[in-house]
Image (cartoon, grey):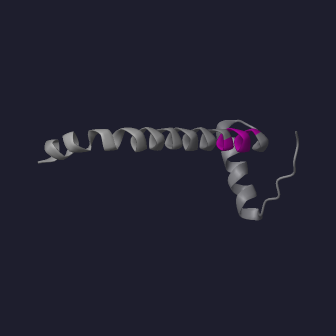
Amino acid sequence: MAFTLRTDAELDAALATLAEEFGLSKQEVVRRLVLAEAAKTKKRHDLDAVLDSELPRWAAVLDRLGQ
């Protein structure tokens, strides 16, 4: 599925720099950065879910370790 990404001069220059540095097209730079950020966000949400479920369970132990 295609869409148009409108950029300003600053963003276009940054994309051009990254594309040249990585030897990729601007489109591929955007693709990889978006996918990397999405993966990072998912990992953060997964970690938050684990902490929300496990931290209360271990709160007393963590308090004793911190003393």
Residue 60 position in % (x across, y down): 21, 43
Q: Which residues are magenta?
A: 28-34
Residue 8 position in % (x across, y down): 77, 63
In the image: residue 21, left or right of residue 2:
left
In the image: residue 29, left or right of residue 67:
right
Q: Nearer the viewer, residue 3 or 8?
A: 3
Q: Residue at x 71, y 63 (%)?
A: 10
Residue 41 position in % (x across, y down): 56, 44
* Dominant secondary-structure state across the stretch colored magenta: helix
Q: Nearer the viewer, residue 18 or 64?
A: 64
In the image: residue 49, left or right of residue 66:
right
Residue 5 position in % (x across, y down): 82, 53
> Which quadrant holds the N terminus?
top right
Q: Is residue 61 magenta?
A: no
Q: Is residue 29 magenta?
A: yes
Q: Residue at x 67, y 44 (%)?
A: 34
